[in-house]
Image (spheres, rainbow, N blue to C red):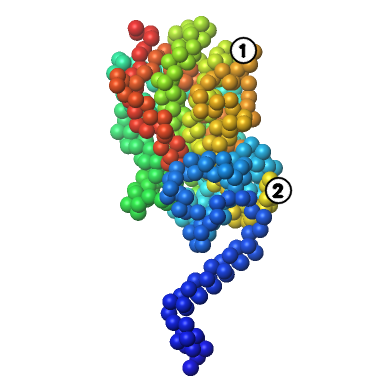
């Protein structure tokens, strides 16, 4: 008779199960302590599932992180199953992690979601030397197209699109409509002009279908927490978007000339033909870069503008103040430019305040520790996942006076717009949003042009819901708005 058989007969099945459970738990605790020492504080994890029960209690990640930041401070640990996750919730820890230690903590997590959607190509899910080369290539290319410098051509594109937007809004003649849909079309047309060298009519069927797929992607395309059917639809939509991009590439091939680079699709064809650098500027990387720019270049600015209008319906006195400022310095036919900022400090301050309060990216895209390092006196272990908790930074009561109040005056001192170190809507460090300069230009031009011409209010009896829905971004719940054209009234 074996020793195990003897123990089994002596103790019985229930006792053996208890003994085995205690042994495994003890082994888990010892192993965890040996592997993870001096971690930031955080809620006590359960064996194997970690702190996943907290997500059941508080499904919105940014709300959970904000609650835990109040309890554990500017840096804490949370466990998603066996995945060690570090959350940074104040300016000091964010700067130390993503600026000072940006090289080490600038990786991207490896998982089925990123692999299936991107193959780790492009710039969003990529890291290492490939990411560095691609980001430099992207920034230089965007600058050539007018992003990040004083470019009359790009600014004119945005102003022209803003005129189309104004015409569409005016056409509703004060009746309720979905302004998020119009912002989607207008902002997407700007990025389409950079990626594909063209804009689309707002009623174009293919364009409308494409934007619908983009909306679904950003609502459900984050970590795979939804149903299998929903995830299958996300993947199908992503493939459809990529087919659209490939169609544009094939159209460009017919008129491509290496002497004149018109847009990012031409850059793709150029990379395809260039034999000098096939290590990182591969066809797959540049293709996914176009997809990344097209997808992200629409969503963030569209959502910011939508939140902006919703906030304005709740603060008519702020709308009026913006309108009066713009009315004094501009003729009614003038579409403000990014260079007009000094003439409209209150309107610019309002844009910053809507970004702070909207928090469209309340939590950064996750980073990955490529090796162990220290932040805030704690150890960040290798392969830990790291989130920047931007919502808590923008709602920090120790920095912002009455942070939940919408108050553009907090940005103005002696008639000039001031900067706040606790303001980082595009993130911070090496992984800061690639398109931030384009987004800033679009926001100030489109928002000021709308405040100049329209007065926004909710339909009679409607109540604003300022809670928001968290997908890949934090978006307002669907609403309709009435726009009174002051030039016609």
Badge 1 crowding class, 10 Å Cα cut-off, few under 14, some 14 to 19, many 20 or more, is few
How many angstroms separate mark 1 from mark 2 (CA)? 41 Å
Rendered position, 340 above or below 211: above
Q: Is residue 336 visible?
A: yes
User: Which label was assigned to residue 164?
Assistant: none
From the viewer's side, name the closer residue of 78 and 11: 11
From the viewer's side, name the closer residue of 140 and 227: 227
Given the current orientation, which residue lies at the most extreme bottom position? 1
Residue 404 x/y as whole percent:
51, 28
Rendered position, 2 above or below 477: below
Is 171 positioned to the left or the right of 94 in the image? left
Q: Secondary structure at mark 2?
A: loop
Residue at 54 percent across and 15 percent down: it is 346
Q: Is residue 273 visible?
A: no
User: Which label was assigned to residue 415?
Assistant: 1
Residue 75 x/y as whole percent:
62, 45
From the viewer's side, name the closer residue of 292 and 67: 67
Residue at 60 percent across and 47 percent down: it is 76
From the viewer's side, name the closer residue of 91 and 382: 91
Rendered position, 87 above or below 164: below
Residue located beneath label 2 in the image: 377
Residue 396 x/y as whole percent:
58, 33
Is 451 positioned to the left or the right of 432 in the image? left
> Which of the 4 quarters of the picture holds residue 36?
bottom right
Badge 2 crowding class, 10 Å Cα cut-off, few under 14, some 14 to 19, many 20 or more, is few
Residue 463 x/y as whole percent:
34, 25
Q: Nearer the viewer, mark 1 or mark 2?
A: 2
Residue at 63 percent across and 50 percent down: it is 40
Rendered position, 335 above or below 439: above
């Amino acid at each position: 008779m074996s020793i195990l058989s003897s123990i089994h007969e002596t103790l019985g099945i229930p006792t053996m199960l208890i003994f085995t459970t205690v042994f495994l738990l003890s082994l888990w605790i010892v192993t965890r302590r040996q592997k993870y020492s001096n971690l930031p504080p955080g809620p006590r994890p359960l064996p194997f599932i970690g702190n996943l029960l907290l997500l059941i209690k508080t499904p919105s990640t940014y709300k959970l992180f904000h609650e835990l930041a109040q309890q554990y401070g500017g840096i804490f640990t949370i466990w998603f199953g066996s995945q060690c996750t570090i959350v940074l919730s104040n300016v000091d820890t964010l700067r130390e992690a993503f600026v000072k230690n940006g090289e080490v903590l600038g990786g991207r997590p490896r998982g089925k979601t990123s692999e299936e959607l991107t193959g780790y190509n492009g710039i969003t899910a990529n890291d290492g030397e490939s990411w560095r080369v691609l980001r430099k290539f992207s920034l230089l290319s965007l600058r050539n197209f007018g992003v990040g410098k004083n470019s009359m051509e790009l600014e004119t594109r945005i102003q022209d699109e803003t005129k189309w937007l104004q015409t569409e809004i005016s056409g509703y003649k004060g009746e309720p409509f979905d302004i998020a849909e119009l912002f989607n079309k207008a902002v997407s047309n700007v990025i389409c002009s950079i990626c594909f060298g063209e804009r689309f009519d707002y009623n174009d069927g293919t364009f409308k279908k494409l934007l619908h797929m983009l909306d679904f992607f950003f609502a459900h395309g984050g970590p795979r927490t939804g149903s299998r059917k929903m995830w299958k639809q996300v993947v199908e939509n992503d493939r459809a978007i990529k087919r659209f991009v490939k169609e544009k590439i094939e159209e460009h091939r017919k008129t491509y000339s290496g002497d004149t680079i018109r847009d990012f699709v031409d850059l793709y064809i150029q990379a395809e033909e260039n034999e000098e650098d096939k290590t990182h500027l591969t066809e797959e990387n540049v293709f996914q870069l176009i997809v990344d720019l097209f997808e992200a270049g629409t969503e963030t600015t569209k959502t910011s503008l939508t939140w902006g209008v919703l906030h304005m319906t709740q603060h008519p006195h702020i709308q009026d103040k913006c309108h009066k400022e713009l009315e004094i310095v501009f003729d009614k036919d003038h579409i403000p430019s990014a260079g007009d900022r000094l003439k409209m400090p209150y309107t610019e301050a309002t844009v910053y305040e809507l970004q702070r309060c909207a928090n469209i990216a309340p939590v950064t895209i996750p980073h990955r520790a490529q090796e162990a390092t220290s932040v805030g006196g704690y150890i960040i272990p290798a392969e830990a996942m790291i989130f920047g908790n931007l919502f808590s930074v923008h709602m920090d009561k120790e920095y912002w006076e009455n942070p939940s109040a919408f108050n553009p005056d907090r940005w103005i001192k002696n008639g000039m717009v001031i900067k706040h170190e606790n303001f980082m809507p595009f993130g911070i460090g090496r992984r800061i949003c690639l398109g931030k300069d384009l987004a800033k230009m679009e926001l100030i031009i489109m928002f000021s042009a709308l405040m100049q011409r329209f007065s926004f209010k909710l339909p009679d009896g409607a109540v604003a819901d300022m809670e928001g829905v968290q997908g890949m971004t934090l978006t307002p719940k669907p609403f309709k708005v009435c726009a009174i054209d002051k030039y016609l009234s």
